[in-house]
């Protein structure tokens, strides 16, 4: 079992990565989250496609927690439309009904949407209760569950969706990454998680990118012996960055490589993109924008990234038949949390392992990124 420790200001998060961990849920909560016998637990459970998470992984965790007694639960649909204040309020209503006090523990099991919403609910209930996350998707294991960001979406005036515009920093005490659950993850959802892993490798440097390329065939086969090491390496990149910049005042912004484009794409709900698919497109756009800004010479890195995304089965231009309004996309970029004073700022590569936050870019640089993905060339 791999273990990462992340100190976030006054909070310590323990991240465990291995196999067979959900069945040891009670043991791990006691040893690594400080669970005591009379502490109340509320389980926020992601239903999952065809209820696979609720009926399999959620039940396994509930069974592991039987010794605690009196565990309450709620089952939630993991849809971007459900990543809302209404869902947060539903959790708060449940907590009120079961008499959850300030010593309570909220445990979320599922993908990034349920973990983000449950985390925000935990941050607000009685001004904050303890949180434990058990991610069941690759993307959540390496990204969403790590670093304390929680949040919900808000509708935009143009009918789109503003990603994570409302939220709080509320780190989990414990993150349990049981790689065995990845065997039940749908192919599309599994591939989507690889986009964040590739992003981490690009940020970390050539050694990490070579390791990503080397392990990819085995990972795509979901080799149970390879996955824990692969997940631990990718999660470790995020841990190291968050450790030195918990609240995104500096280096943590590098984790947004490709995300300003990605969040704009996700606002166009008709495209029906998963977050990881939007990130894949955002990585291609960021490489092209970097070339247009003079940070990259030629398209060697873009071609390398595009080739890896192809091997992952991820999109490198918007799906056939899809369309997007460039003006609307630009407006969403200006609303992005990383923008300052309505000015678009992008995280762009200068080389593998050399990623920069760039302000004051000309419109033609931003649009070069869109040109790379809004049509095949």
Image (cartoon, rainbow, N blue to C red):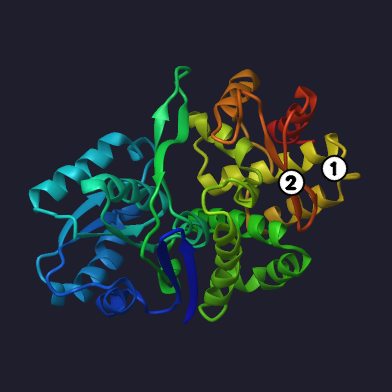
Q: Nearer the viewer, residue 265 or 33?
A: 33
| Dot 1 and dot 2 residues touching (CB under 8 Å) | yes
Q: Splitting the image into 4 quarters, where does residue 155 fall?
A: top left
Splitting the image into 4 quarters, where does residue 15 fall? bottom left
Label 2 Cα crowd, 10 Å radius (few <14 / some 14-19 / many 20+): some
Question: Which residue is found at the position 79% from the left and 24% from the top?
Answer: 364
- The answer to whether 317 is drawn above or below residue 210 in the figure is above
Question: Which residue is identified by label 2?
Answer: 356
Q: Earlier in the sequence, mark 1 or mark 2?
A: 1
Element type where label 2 sits in the image: strand
Question: Which x, y percent locates residue 272?
Answer: 49, 37
Question: Which residue is denoted by mark 1 in the rendering?
Answer: 295
> From where the camera sits, is residue 139 visible?
yes
Which is more toward the observer, 261 or 239? 239
Give how far across and how far down residue 144 sits, in percent: 47, 54
For marks 1 and 2, give the CA distance. Answer: 9 Å
């Amino acid at each position: 079992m791999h273990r990462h420790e992340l100190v976030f200001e006054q909070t310590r998060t323990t991240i465990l990565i291995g196999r067979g961990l959900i069945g040891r849920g009670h043991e791990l909560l006691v040893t690594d989250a400080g669970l005591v016998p009379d502490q109340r637990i509320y389980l926020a459970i992601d239903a999952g496609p065809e209820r696979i998470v609720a009926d399999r992984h959620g039940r396994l965790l509930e069974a592991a927690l039987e010794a605690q007694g009196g565990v309450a639960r709620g089952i939630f649909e993991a849809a971007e439309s459900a990543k809302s204040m209404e869902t947060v309020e539903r959790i708060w209503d449940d907590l009120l009904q079961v008499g959850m006090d300030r010593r309570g523990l909220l445990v979320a099991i599922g993908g990034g949407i349920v973990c983000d919403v449950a985390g925000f609910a935990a941050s607000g209930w009685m001004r904050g209760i303890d949180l434990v996350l058990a991610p069941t998707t690759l993307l959540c294991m390496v990204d969403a569950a790590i670093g304390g960001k929680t949040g919900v979406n808000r509708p935009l005036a143009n009918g789109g969706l503003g990603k994570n515009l409302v939220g709080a920093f509320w780190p989990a005490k414990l993150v349990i990454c049981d790689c065995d659950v990845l065997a039940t993850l749908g192919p599309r959802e599994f591939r989507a998680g690889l986009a964040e892993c590739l992003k981490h490798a690009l940020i970390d440097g050539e050694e990490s990118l070579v390791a990503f390329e080397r392990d990819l065939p085995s990972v795509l086969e979901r080799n149970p012996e390879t996955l824990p090491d692969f997940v631990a390496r990718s999660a470790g990149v995020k841990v190291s960055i968050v450790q030195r910049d918990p609240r995104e005042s500096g280096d943590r912004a590098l984790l947004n490589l490709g995300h300003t484009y990605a969040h704009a794409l996700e606002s166009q709900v008709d495209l029906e993109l998963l977050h990881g698919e939007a990130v894949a497109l955002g990585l291609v756009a960021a490489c092209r924008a970097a070339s247009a800004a003079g940070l990259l010479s030629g398209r060697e890195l873009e071609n390398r990234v595009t080739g890896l995304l192809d091997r992952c089965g991820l999109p490198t231009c918007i799906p056939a038949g899809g369309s997007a309004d460039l003006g609307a996309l630009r407006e969403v970029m200006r609303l992005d949390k990383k923008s300052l004073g309505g000015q678009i700022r992008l995280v762009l590569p200068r080389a593998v392992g050399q990623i920069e936050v760039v302000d004051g870019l000309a419109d033609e640089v931003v649009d070069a990124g869109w040109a790379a993905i809004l049509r095949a060339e």
